[in-house]
Amino acid sequence: MPQPVIRPARADEYDEIARVWMESWVSTGLAEASEFLLANLRARIRREIENGWSLFVADDNGAIAAMLALHLPKLYLDMLFVGPAYQGQSLGRKLLAFTRTQMPDEMYLRCVRENEKAWRWYEREGFVFEKEKVEPSNGFVMKYYRWKRPAAG
């Protein structure tokens, strides 16, 4: 079976991207699916794109398998969410490899402290923990990470 293709998101896909984002977030056990959450994510996608997001999707023959949001000027991997049906198939690793082509020398990210599966994965992928801080907009304690290309040697 061919792997999903990573490509820039289209505006007509934002609602579907928000649905995949919500389902992936809900799969962490940290939220419950709701029309309210979905509406907030839909609005956030449009707002974040206006604020500099580069939004990509993993396209599985027309189905959105995952979403990836990068803020390239800030060297920031903002969102990486794989739909539940695609989890455990190394799609996250493929998205991270793609991210490293966009930000090859250094990048930052943050992750909800209670999402242990995610932050442990980032640590295995070479990200280094820097600090924890409460995110005022949602009340979650966030773990901040940095990745830097290993020096040639």
Image (tube, rainbow, N blue to C red):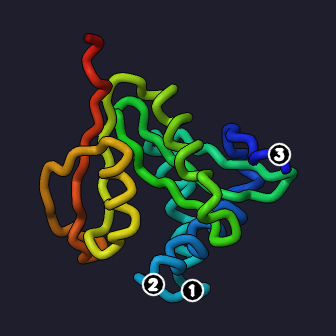
Label 3–label 2 contact, CB within 8 A:
no
**Quarter holding the C terminus?**
top left
Please tell me whether mark 2 sits on a helix, a strand or a loop: loop
Amino acid type at circle 2 is Gly
| Residue at position x 60%, y 63% in the image | 88
- In the image as oriented, which residue stretches furthest toward the top? 153
Amino acid type at circle 1 is Ala
Look at mark 1 in the image and give the residue it sits on.
33
Label 1–label 2 contact, CB within 8 A:
no
Look at mark 3 in the image and give the residue it sits on.
2
Q: Position of residue 74 (x, y in %)?
A: 33, 34
Residue neighbourhood size for the residue with mark 3, other residues' Cα within 10 Å, grouped as few (<14), some (14–19), many (≥20): few
Label 3–label 1 contact, CB within 8 A:
no
Q: Position of residue 26 (x, y in %)?
A: 52, 80
Look at mark 2 in the image and give the residue it sits on.
29
Q: Earlier in the sequence, mark 3 or mark 2?
A: 3
Nearest the eye: 97 or 50: 97
Image depth: mark 3 or mark 1 in front: 3
Q: Earlier in the sequence, mark 3 or mark 1?
A: 3
Please tell me whether mark 3 sits on a helix, a strand or a loop: loop
Q: Position of residue 112 (x, y in %)?
A: 31, 68
- Distance from Cα at disc 3 to Cα at disc 1: 30 Å
